[in-house]
Amino acid sequence: METGNETRILEFLLLGISEKPELQSFLFGVFLCMYLVTISGNLLIILATITDSNLHTPMYFFLSNLSFVDICFTTTTIPKMLVNIQTQRKVISYVGCLTQMYFFLHFAGLEDLILTVMAYDRYVAICYPLHYMITMNPWLCVLLILGSWIISVLYSILESSLVLRLSFCQPLEIHHFFCEYNQIVQLACSDTFLNDIVMYLLSGLLGGGPFIGIIFSYSKIVSSIHEISSAVGKYKAFSTCLSHLTVVSLFYCSVLTVYIRSFVTHNAHASAPASVMYTVLIPMLNPFIYSLRNKDIKRALKRFLTGKP
């Protein structure tokens, strides 16, 4: 099934974060702990919002969806990485690689869109508090989440389907711990002009569009907070946005750092450790960011864990 160096049935090699044998046990332990913390933390947020009637509001509905996406996001990459370290095999099949790439693109895009929806929710809550419950009704909340899923699915299908048209040549080594879209395209022997154009176009739309929406929402929020006369009122209004603003800042700063760094240095090895920030660390930190300063979440978690009504 081979013609020269071009292959039809493929296996890729995921080289991981480091190829040093002495670091593999350490990396396995660290990423296993981070994965377990991510799953348990986000799962607790979901269960707390479901079981506590006081958290049946639009803000916590969106938060539980974000927690679900974080669980799926990390599950797309970390288990395969852990298996590769444990078995000392770096192979991933062609179908497995494309499947992992599809779900990574899907959940990365979905996280971006849900963060934008949460910014809109805070915008309505602070700028139009008297109309909040009417505007953010259950139907609109469901439609916003459903729309985010549809856009993300279409985005990931389009990106993944364009990879199917490519042919690849040996060696098929991916300098990453998962099948990252850009690195897969760079391994192709065939013309990748269409892939590059679509990638930059969709990245601009799916990355730039939500980012502009978040900036617009927070510009209006800051303006509304500035008009509040009392210092206590300003603090209360701003505190409802602080957790979300922290998560948004971490997410966008880490993503921009990874892609700007890889674009400037053209070093495939450099992007793998940096990608850990937004693929593993931020999903792990999100439950802590949203719960440590949130009395409602802490109260709901205490009730859930203790079983007290």
Image: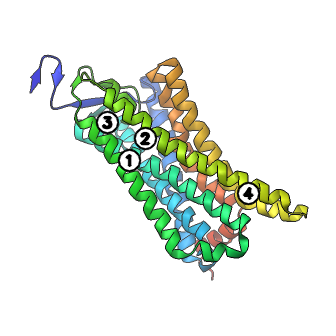
Q: Are marks 2 and 1 in contact (CB under 8 Å)?
A: yes
Residue at the disc numbered 1: 155
Q: Alpha carbon of mark 1 to alpha carbon of mark 3: how far?
A: 33 Å
Residue at the disc numbered 3: 87
Up the image or down, 274 lies above or below 158; here it is above
Name the one closer to the observer, 24 or 277: 277
Q: Locate the C terminus by quadrant.
A: bottom right
Q: Which amino acid type is shown beneath numbered disc 2?
A: Leu
Q: Locate the N terminus by quadrant.
A: top left
- Residue name at image x 62 percent, y 48 percent: 248
Mark 1 vs mark 4: which is more N-terminal? Answer: 1
Q: Which amino acid type is shown beneath numbered disc 4?
A: Ile
Q: In the image, which is nearer the foreground, mark 3 or mark 2? A: 2
**How far across and how far down the image is residue 65, in percent?**
50, 62
Mark 2 vs mark 1: which is more N-terminal? Answer: 1
Residue at the disc numbered 4: 221
> Picture quarter containing residue 269?
top left
- Residue name at image x 23 percent, y 41 percent: 95
Q: Is residue 97 left or right of residue 302?
A: left
Name the one closer to the observer, 260 or 29: 260
Q: Alpha carbon of mark 2 to alpha carbon of mark 4: how far?
A: 28 Å
Q: Are marks 3 and 2 in contact (CB under 8 Å)?
A: no
- Residue name at image x 24 percent, y 23 percent: 190
Residue 217 seen anywhere in this rendered image of the structure: yes
Residue at the disc numbered 2: 202
Mark 2 vs mark 4: which is more N-terminal? Answer: 2
**How far across and how far down the image is residue 7, in percent?**
16, 25
**How far across and how far down the image is residue 252, in percent?**
59, 41
Mark 3 vs mark 2: which is more N-terminal? Answer: 3
Q: Considering the numbered disc 2 on the image, is that residue within a helix, a strand or a loop?
A: helix
Q: Considering the numbered disc 4 on the image, is that residue within a helix, a strand or a loop?
A: helix
